[in-house]
Image (tube, grey):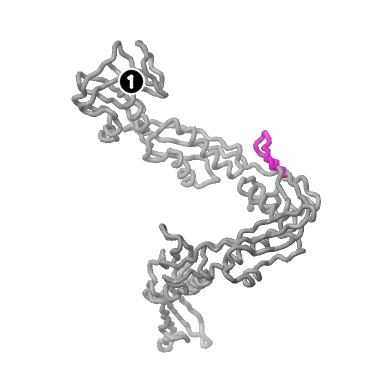
Amino acid sequence: MTIRSTLFPARLVYPVVATCALSVGVVHAQATQFVVKDIEVEGLRRTEAGTVFSYLPIRVGDTFTDEKALQAIRSLFATGFFEDVKISAKGDVLVVTVVERPAIASVEINGTKEFDKETLKEALKGVGIGESLIFDRSLLDKAEQELKRQYLSRSKYGAQVQTRVDQLARNRVGITFNIDEGESASIKQLKILGAKDFEEEELLEEFELSTGGWMSWYSKNDQYSRQKLSGDIEKLRSFYLNRGYADFSIENTQVQIAPNKQDIFITITIKEGEKFTFGDIELSGQLLGRDDELRSLIKMKKGETFNGELLTDSSKAIQDRLGNYGYAFANANVIPDIDREKRVVNINMAVDTGKRVYVRRMNVGGNTRTKDEVIRREFRQFESSWYDSRKIQLSKERVDRLGYFSNVDIETQPVPGTSDQIDVNMQVEKKPTGNLLLGAGISSTDSLVLSAAIQQQNLFGTGKTVGLELKHEQGQPHNIVFPDRPILHD
């Protein structure tokens, strides 16, 4: 009895009693069953035999059946390691013969100027095409689509990709992608329909995208990008909301590409709505007895033109103030109530303080040179103390002012399993803190003057500064000049 599975339909002489998506066929004159005394695997080069055994649903001592044979073939194909699997019986020995898929020895990309080749290779790895990976021919289409997607993000809609696969020794392949980038598509028309109270030119000034100008070769602002368009639409929305149009909406956005794949036409349809003013402004929720203090942070006033930016700023100011008192996860939710007849928007700012939290640990990462205590002595937020956003920000600023780091970032992270603790993580990047200056010149007596100065602002990571300057004038004794400040100081 022979069970064989290939990637292509086989010619079957006997009736097929079972099939699967990979054209598996069981051909026999009559069903065969026997107790498996041993299992042999043939055709392996790179794959370990243990890998095959781990996927086989048949073990020594099991009774061999057609159903188990089909399960074995499906399981081995599902690994993606093999392009052909054959299961046969030699007496009471089960023989598994496989043909391994080739390994990818190299991936070459030709013709790309828009992208760094390594960037494209990383993108290809994401779809399964990369050096040392198992080659699956069915993934080539995905790889080509991924390359085209990368070029679409740069407005190169005419980019073409051709793929060549070369068979190499030792069951390996080399894959070459030949790319014709074509020309970048540019925006030929950008229109905003539905504007009544503002000129279209004024609205388009808010956009990053445009139909181009004399600097477009550098800014590439005439090249379409979905991300840029989304950003421009949000700018347009903010433009109206900050000027009283609380009912403003984007009705439709159309992006059309001409048949030549070089011209793009963008049309945005808007509905301005009516202009509104602020009505009653209320503050509710968990105010902690600080009603007047929190109310003073509200920047809107009744009767003023509705402004979305003021709403956002007021909400953030309240949240930041509550953060100073230990409420790291406080929210000030804006609940608008639009009265279209009176054209006013009543605002209720509902405050939810959440639990008061304290700092479990202050962690410092990225520091490889400066002693830990030099950094920690700048902290104004302490461990096991209530969270205070002012002190955390001040700690960041003081560490930054040390001058030992090119970048200082700080973030808070909830402690897993708790609701009232956080860790504060500070990440720093070191920078050179030493200076060496060499100079030469001519003195008033026409003598050659040589000078050298050296300074280290973070000596051995201690946070101390040491400096030394040497001067020598031709015909004069050596002169050592110390800086005006002390030689060694914090």
Q: Is residue 381 left or right of residue 258?
A: left
Residue 286 placement: quadrant:
bottom right
With 36 as the anchor, is 103 left or right in this view? right
Name the outermost residue toward the right: 196
Picture quadrant where residue 352 is located = bottom right
Residue 387: % across, % down: 48, 69
Query: Residue 82 location, x and y as percent?
Result: 35, 30
Vertical comparison of 94 with 190: above or below: above
- Give the quadrant of the C terminus: bottom left
**Region of the chain picked out in magenta, as a range:** 252-268
Amino acid type at circle 1 is Arg
* Quadrant in which residue 362 is drawn: bottom left
List the residue tagged with mark 1: 4
Residue 219 in sight: yes
Residue depicted at 55% across the width and 40% down the height: 149
Q: Residue at x 61, y 48 (%)?
A: 227
Whole-percent x, y for residue 379 in the image: 45, 73
Q: Is residue 451 magenta?
A: no
Q: Going 38% across and 69% down the picture, which residue do you hit?
A: 369
Kind of element beneath mark 1: strand
